[in-house]
Amino acid sequence: MLRSSLVLALFFVLTGVAVAQERYLLNAGDVLEVSVWNEETLQKQVIILPDGMISFPLAGQLMAQGKSVTDVQNTLKEKLTEYLSDPVVTVSVINVVGNSIHIMGKVNTPGSFVMSQRIDVMQALSLAGGLSPYAEENNIIVLRRNGAKQQVIPVRYASIKKGRDLDSNIMLKSGDVIVVP
């Protein structure tokens, strides 16, 4: 009985890790562990460079930023197929350094925060210790860079707390800046 419970718990933990890695999109600064089964010389930790690229023996350079772990794994497998017969490639995220948001202004703990999963504005403000008593709840904004342009997204905190205007509780992206006046 205990053994079957342990096996079931382990299954759910491992499934949760796989699902989390599938949803996570890679960013510059993230560290990946890449290994090819039965090829000891093709096991390496790689850092996603600021331009979004990684380099791996035999595969060369490939874009990793903005892609899922599975996407990178499949691309590596495809490139390595030119040199190896049916390679089994595994890619794991070791460190999520590149996936950060920044919270500034009238919060209890302003700063930069690394996101290990996707979070919304309310969750991010909670990470920052909540709003200070002097914060202007309905003037909070999210600054988001889209290429060369910067987008300003209003967040109506007081309304969200009351269960209204929930659409302004947006999911954050890497590099977003929350400003609490």
Image (cartoon, rainbow, N blue to C red):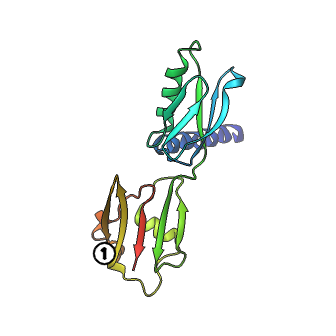
The residue lying at 68 percent from left, 29 percent from top is 43
The residue lying at 49 percent from left, 38 percent from top is 64
Q: Is residue 129 above or below residue 17?
A: below
Front-most of residues 27 and 116? 27
Image side of residue 62 versus residue 167, left or right? right
Front-most of residues 61 and 117? 61
Q: How many marks?
A: 1
Front-most of residues 50 and 171? 50
Quadrant (top left/top right/bottom left/bottom right) for the N terminus: top right
Tell which residue pokes out farthest to the bottom in this image.
134
Quadrant (top left/top right/bottom left/bottom right) for the C terminus: bottom left
Image-quadrant location for residue 142:
bottom left
Tell which residue pokes out farthest to the top in this image.
85
What amino acid is labelled 1 in the image? Ser
Image-quadrant location for residue 167:
bottom left
The residue lying at 49 percent from left, 44 percent from top is 26
The residue lying at 51 percent from left, 45 percent from top is 20
Residue 31: image location, x then y, percent:
60, 44
Front-most of residues 119 and 105? 105
Image side of residue 103 versus residue 140, left or right? right
- For mark 1, give the secondary structure: helix
Q: Is residue 12 above or below residue 96?
A: above
Image side of residue 162 versus residue 83, left or right? left
Image-quadrant location for residue 15:
top right
Image side of residue 147 versus residue 34, left or right? left
Q: Is residue 40 above or below residue 63?
A: above
Residue 110: image location, x then y, percent:
52, 74
The residue wearing badge 1 is 159
